């Protein structure tokens, strides 16, 4: 006779709050627990959950201007066309994220890392780009700052249009 052990794995749950930079007011919060039965890695499950929560918050009328997204894993998110003026993305990973047509004026993008993403036609007027790294990122039509063109952004092998 063989003995069988059944182990129950309980996913650790965490609560994430997205706050406003200037007031520390909570814009929205959500609980995340990874599914140990899923074939998807925990970080991918997190990215999907965060993307859904941001979409839900926008649909519910949450104003994301000035939101604190600093030092977060924000890879693979679709933030196309969102008004993110003054938002803080400093130190965040934005690989494969879509920020086309987003308003990122006066946003803090210090030290962000974006590979194979899109900032096409995004408004970056007044945004802090110190230490930002863009690689193989679509910068077509980006408005960076007065008198500057996307060709002068910190990047390597980025797709861009200087017309």
Image (cartoon, helix red, strand yellow):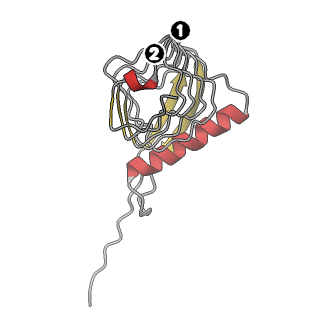
Kindly identify which residue carries mark 2: 148
Q: Residue 45: x, y in percent?
A: 46, 50
Q: What residue lies at 59% left-to-right and 28% top-to-bottom?
A: 102
Q: Quadrant of residue 58?
A: top right
Q: Which residue is mark 1?
A: 22
Closer to the chain start, of discs 2 and 1, is: 1
Task: Give the percent coordinates (x, y) of residue 143.
Answer: 53, 21
Percent of width and height locating residue 11: 42, 51
Identify which residue is drawn at 56% across, 27% down: 122
Vertical placement of residue 152 versus 41, above or below: above
- The answer to whether one can see residue 75 in this image is yes
- Name which residue lies at 40% across and 26% down: 151
Residue 105's quadrant in the figure? top right
Question: Which secondary structure, mark 2?
Answer: loop
Farthest residue to the front: give it: 163
Within 10 Å of the Cα at label 2, are there few (<14), some (14-19), or many (20+) other Cα atoms? few
Residue 33 visible, this orientation: no
């Amino acid at each position: 006779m063989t003995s069988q052990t059944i182990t129950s794995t309980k996913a650790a749950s965490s609560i994430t709050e997205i706050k406003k930079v200037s007031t520390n007011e909570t814009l929205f919060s959500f609980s995340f627990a990874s599914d140990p039965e899923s074939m998807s890695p925990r970080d991918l499950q997190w990215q999907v959950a965060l993307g859904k929560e941001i979409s839900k918050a926008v649909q519910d009328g949450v104003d994301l201007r000035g939101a604190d997204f600093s030092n977060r894993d924000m890879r693979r998110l679709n933030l196309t066309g969102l008004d993110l003026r003054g938002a803080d993305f400093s130190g965040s990973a934005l690989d494969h994220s879509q920020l086309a047509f987003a308003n990122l004026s006066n946003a803090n993008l210090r030290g962000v890392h974006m590979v194979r993403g899109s900032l096409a036609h995004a408004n970056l007027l007044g945004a802090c780009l110190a230490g930002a790294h863009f690689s193989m990122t679509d910068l077509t039509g980006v408005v960076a700052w007065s008198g500057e063109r996307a060709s002068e952004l910190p990047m390597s092998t980025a797709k861009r249009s200087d017309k």
